[in-house]
Image (spheres, rainbow, N blue to C red):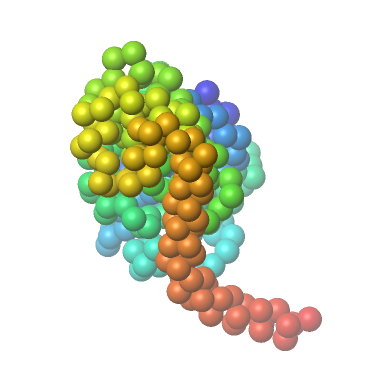
């Protein structure tokens, strides 16, 4: 299911008891919505002392910080991602992206309680961001994330449509991005539809089977999320630029 270099990175982290949640493309693979990626995206709690196990794991993986900001709990708590490149022979070239805060999501302790635990062997157990939380995390301004949200929800529906729980039905109604799937779920489960109709107004179009208008409403919903993500990242981007400028000046002075 996962490539050997990825398994090496995750196994080393577990050996140092790093408490983290796997997210991004590798989590999508576990959830049945395959996405090729040589990156490993993890979420962890950034507090005094909590980064030491990760530091030890990164040292064994011969991982170097490849961009600003530097590796510190302060930058992680403010919402930045810290990026590493591995040079260990068994994981050479693998990139590790570390975050502690995600837009629109709860703090780490709550996300940890909702995690999905996957066991692929007696010695290989991994903790993933829960599927609903992963879908929320994918609501970014990046083009590639929106088709992935669609695939994640569709895969989940295919796997659980025979005997779904009320929680699963509500998840489909709140997060599905395919007009045909929304129409199917809204009309198949009228009680659940009535429960979350006010939370997502475009569901009214689904129960009316108005696919054309529903498509337009989904586009507007996506557009709104993209804009919100852009606004969220703007001050963080400016802070990164302020960190890059001194580096640039030194490079110019040496040239």
- Screen quadrant of the C terminus: bottom right
Q: Is residue 248 left or right of residue 31?
A: right
Return the x and y of residue 65 as percentages of the image width and height.
54, 59
Residue 175: quarter of image: top left
Return the x and y of residue 115 as percentages of the image width and height.
29, 36
Return the x and y of residue 171 as percentages of the image width and height.
32, 34
Return the x and y of residue 17 as percentages of the image width and height.
33, 40
Question: From the viewer's perspective, is residue 97 above or below residue 47?
Answer: above
- Residue at the image position 61 percent from the left and 47 percent from the top: 87
Residue 16: quarter of image: top left
Q: Which of 158 and 90 is in front in this view?
A: 158
Question: From the viewer's perspective, is residue 11 above or below residue 40?
Answer: above
Q: Which residue lies furthest to the top in this view?
A: 162
Q: Which of 91 and 226 is in front in this view?
A: 226
- Residue at the image position 45 percent from the left and 58 percent from the top: 224
Q: In this view, does 87 lie to the left or right of 23?
A: right
Q: Nearer the viewer, residue 108 or 8?
A: 108
Q: Nearer the viewer, residue 55 or 79?
A: 79
Q: Is residue 29 visible?
A: no
The mark tally for this picture is 0
- Residue at the image position 25 percent from the left and 46 percent from the top: 198
Q: Is residue 216 visible?
A: yes
- Residue at the image position 29 percent from the left and 20 percent from the top: 164
């Amino acid at each position: 299911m996962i490539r050997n270099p990825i398994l090496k990175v995750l196994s080393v982290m577990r050996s140092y008891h790093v408490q983290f949640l796997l997210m991004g493309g590798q989590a999508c693979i576990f959830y049945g919505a395959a996405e090729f990626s040589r990156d490993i995206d993890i979420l962890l709690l950034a507090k005094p002392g909590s980064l030491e196990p990760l530091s030890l794991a990164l040292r064994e993986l011969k991982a170097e910080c490849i961009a600003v900001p530097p590796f510190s709990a302060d930058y992680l708590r403010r919402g930045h991602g810290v990026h590493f490149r591995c040079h260990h022979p068994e994981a050479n070239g693998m990139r590790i992206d570390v975050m502690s805060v995600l837009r629109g999501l709860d703090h780490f302790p709550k996300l940890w309680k909702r995690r999905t635990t996957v066991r692929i062997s007696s010695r290989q157990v991994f903790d993933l961001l829960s599927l609903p939380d992963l879908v929320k995390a994918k609501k970014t301004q990046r083009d590639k994330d929106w088709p992935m949200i669609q695939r994640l929800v569709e895969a989940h529906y295919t796997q659980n449509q025979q005997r779904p729980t009320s929680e699963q039905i509500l998840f489909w109604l709140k997060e599905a991005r395919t007009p045909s799937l929304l129409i199917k779920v809204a009309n198949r489960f009228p009680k659940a539809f009535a429960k979350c109709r006010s939370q997502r107004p475009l569901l009214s179009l689904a129960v009316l089977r108005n696919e054309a208008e529903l498509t337009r409403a989904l586009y507007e919903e996506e557009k709104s999320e993209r804009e919100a993500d852009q606004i969220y990242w703007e001050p963080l981007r400016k802070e990164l630029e302020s960190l890059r400028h001194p580096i640039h000046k030194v490079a110019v002075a040496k040239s």
